[in-house]
Amino acid sequence: MHVLTEYPILTILIFLPLAGCLLLLPVWNCRVSARPIALGVALLELALSVWLYVSRQDLPGVQTKLPGYLLSQDAPWIPSFGIRYTLGLDGISLLMVMLTAFTFCMALLVSWNSIKEKTGLFLTLMLTMEAGIMGVFLALDLALFYLFWEVMLIPMFFMIGIWGHGRKIYSTIKFFLFTMFGSLLMLLAIIFLHLLHAQQTGLATFGLHDLLKTQLPADTQLWLFAAFFLAFAIKFPLFPLHTWLPDAHTDAPTAGSVVLAGLLLKTGSYGLIRFGYPLFPQAAQALTPLFYTLALISIIYASLVAFAQEDMKRLIAYSSIGHMGYVAIGIAAWQPVALSGSILQMASHGVTTGALFCLVGMLDERAHTREIAAFGGLWGNIPKYSFFFLLFSLASLGLPGLNNFVGEFLVLTGTMKKSPLVAALAFVGIVLTLIYTVRLVQEVLFQKERQPLPLADLSLREICILAAFAAVAVWMGIHPAPLLDLVHAPVQLLTGGGL
Amino acid sequence: MFDNVWLIPLFPLIGFLINGFFGKKIKNEAVIGGIGTLMIFMSFIVSCGILLQMIGLPPEQRVFEKVLFPWIHSGNFKADMAFLVDPLSAVMIMVVTGVGSLIHLYSIGYMHGEEGFYRFFAYLNLFCMSMLLLVLGNNMLVMFIGWEGVGLCSYLLIGYYFHKKSAGDAAKKAFVMNRVGDFGFLIGLFTLYWWFGSNHNIWTINFTEIKAASHLLPYGGVVTVATLCFFVGATGKSAQIPLFTWLPDAMEGPTPVSALIHAATMVTAGVYMIGRMSFVFIKSPETMMVIAVVGAATAIFAATIGTAQNDIKRVLAYSTVSQLGFMFLAMGVGAFTAGIFHLMTHAFFKACLFLGSGSVIHSMHHALHKIHSHDDAQDMRNMGGLRSAMPITFITFLVSTIAISGIPGFSGFFSKDEILWQAFANPYHGGLNIVLWGVGALAACFTAFYMFRLVFMTFFGECRINAKAKSYLHESPLVITIPLMVLGFLAAVGGYIGLPKLIGDMFGGIPNYFEHWLEPVFALANQYSAQYAHHGAHPSHAFEWSLMGLSVVIALIGIGIAFTMYVQNKDLPGKFTATFPALHRAVYNKWYIDELYDFIFVNPCKAFGQFLWKGFDVIVVDGVVNGVANVVMGFSGIFRYIQSGYIYNYAFSMALGVVAILGYYIFK
């Protein structure tokens, strides 16, 4: 028996950050000692998830209830309502868990010096959020999933509201309203599904693998899926539900943006893959044209708008919408190659965009502005910074050999099979992506030096952050085979095999 | 030796890493340039080894594949990081590493004293690596890494003088236009992949496997769609109509870049790609027709523009576009060998011409700098009479000019004449063949004209810069002239490995080595073409001779006109412009194609983005949301109150939230 199966490793993944919060209490006001504790916990999480990844082939796998899962845990939690504490880890979750652990390490490091007030609270919120996101990616009981879903959102409201800049209150309320609206609809749908299942079978359950067997009339299915879809589409975000994102990103602190783009957006796509499509396959099928349309509009619309932006952070925020549009297309195609591409793109986008937000944050710390027009010729001024800026811009525009290419390529390959027209239109987005990204690079790195002050080049800490991002980006671009292998089995199960 | 093929792209990669990361600390130009040049030269040695080994093998065994590691594997989709060595890629790696080495060497002299010297060599090495991946890839996706990689390096190198806005804009334009082409490449790839997969359960993007299964492809239909898409990719990379306008602007980059990327290697990628997939392209007569027509049209169109430019590099740039048109014309009439042959000879003479122009610019720049003049060192109107000051540059330049003009005995004659002959004799395009030949011949006439115009304006006549500056003009150092001499030599004699049968027979049956060499690569395509095109009665030798003679006469006419206008009677150009001002303005302004594209694509796109953001996003979508938000203003007030309070408040409200949610579930 593998050592990992002897401990409730999934529970540890979720509750370790919460335990970290307790450790922070004694040093609440002491920034110097609180930061290493939080970082230590995050690193421990990363180590755990990497260990899981490395030893994934030695895990016996879960045979009985959850085929295709590597690890699972199941215990009754609130028996009177049939709510169980069910966790499961398959290849998709594992990839997301690794992304989460990695992103939090980076987010903590990038905010190392910039968060000067209420550090204890900030770190607590970060760790709580990590616990919540881990839970979202592991929960297989819908009630549990919903709980984690809320746990991960609440700290983000505070993070934008307290440590943000600009119109932070406006932005956080906007974010709050959008997400709450979606969450509540999803909650209603979950309860409705629960009741329906209880009515049919007499079994009160929120477990995903029981609910999958619920018989749903077509129109009910459509309504329930619509509710789920709305909640997840807001998270994606899909046009026209996207306007919270540019504001939230622009006004959030850097760490907040990194987590938001790297992870919170992914919970939407993950939710669709894990719950939305398997629970309501016919409805999903019926809504595919709508999904395609929204995704395509998102890609093209966001790319065009990104081109017109004057604030770097806002530009990257819009680019995020565009990139997530590819994830959406891959899910809508619901085809193994495209879906694998979507899942890989989720991870890739987290890395690339996370790094870009870090870069903008670093520039903001130096120059106290993010206006594109305020910069120029950085290449001559701060070459190390510029190198990373160029690298991640190239990754973002989908240069082969770097991470984003693999995901987007597979999405388009798969979609081409299902609907060539959609794939062809999505290509327009690829050209547009290049245009606005090159414009950003051009204005900021090249041309005449415009910035008023001589800026300092990267510090060692910043180099470490960006080098870690870069290593992952290059590795995912050159050798994505193991990751694709990781998601292969679950994707086959989800799409029912076939092409 | 075949097994070591991975070393070929690896060496430049190492060079890139060393110079890219440590170049700034190394500082010493000789070391940086030395590393860069050595790395590509090592690749050249390995390439030579591979070539020699291949020559030793019987033709049918000259194919080798080397799989390094699995790259993208997802379900049925498999793309390995793998290389294909065959006679075609052998020619390409020899050209890339050989000409590449010379240009690296040249750059040590040319870039001397430039800020960011290390950056230049890092990019050059990275470019070579990408280009080698492009030609060595055994599947479309590895080719695509190279395809995009060379685009990136081209972007970085055009924008090398990044403080200059014009350089940045040119770089951006090149990148975007290439990306538009890539769009076609990928769609083509998908089309072939899914067609083979769903119809024949063959899931592959591997060239060898597609070749083996190519008999399953129908003539026309899906193949036309796929190949037209691929061809769109080729027009972007190889600067053909309609995606050619980036190449002349790319002259903003340093001159060695123009020689390496925008003449000898990258821009030929499209031609190579068609050659690599000849067995697919040949199955679509429609696409072949399009390629031939676009090639011929580009050849003549760019040649006309070349006649009116005054910037020495721009003339060469349009000349490159035009010569690439010749290569596509060859591909389009099924003369794959001739196309690749012209690719190779063009690499020699055009690299020599660009490097020679660089040598001129270098010297002019130096002289103008000495007298603190701000005159344009690249404008031919400031030059003249340089042949006495720069004899080596002049002679090599002249040899290459003769070669490109198609004067018998020099490399360009053999390759270009072969293309024109094939355009005429090809059985594919019905009555169009005479048109194709005619347009090609006319373009050749223009070529001879503008090239000799360039030579006369630059090297002959009176020196037009002031007398003081004239004394500073000097021949370039050896590190610059050695590559010129080598390339000049190749431009002169490189054509003899591909002697036309007609001439070979005259000298006791010297075979066309080049054709025999590429025979195994294109045999299948030729076989397919025989199935649909009827090779009529072969025109007589006498006819072939007279056609050849005609093309020589045409070239001589071009030279003659140039001589009359720019040496004998120098008022003529002025009179000509005065007589036809509109025509001259249109040609000088490149037929206003840039302005047209700005009007149709660029400006509307910009305006639309602004409108969507300021108009739609902020007013319409946010308007609705803010309306909702205003309703809950009270809530916002509470939030503001909480926000400004103590940390306990936050902890408290957090706890409250959690309790509320838990409570909801427990006490519902």
Image (tube, coloured by chain):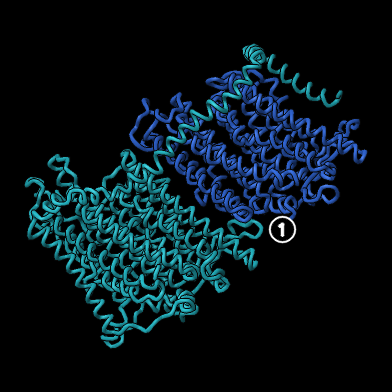
Q: Residue at x 78, y 24 (%)?
A: B661
Return the chain for callout 1: A
Q: Secondary structure at mark 1?
A: loop
Amino acid type, residue under disc 1 in the picture: Gly
> Mark 1 packing: few (<14 Cα in 10 Å), some, or many (20+)?
few
- Residue B663 is situated, as x and y percent measured from the top left of the image, at 82, 22
- Residue A225 is situated, as x and y percent measured from the top left of the image, at 74, 39
* Residue B1 in the figure: left or right of residue A452: right
Q: Residue at x 17, y 69 (%)?
A: B556
Q: Which chain is blue in the rendering?
A: A
**Which quadrant holds residue B201?**
bottom right
A263 to B197, vertically: above or below: above
Give the camera-side residue of A313 and B325.
B325
Q: Which chain is cyan in the rendering?
A: B
Is residue A488 visible to us here? yes
User: In the rendered image, which residue does mark 1 sit on?
Assistant: A498
Q: Quadrant of the C terminus of chain B?
A: top right
Give the camera-side residue of A134 and B422.
B422
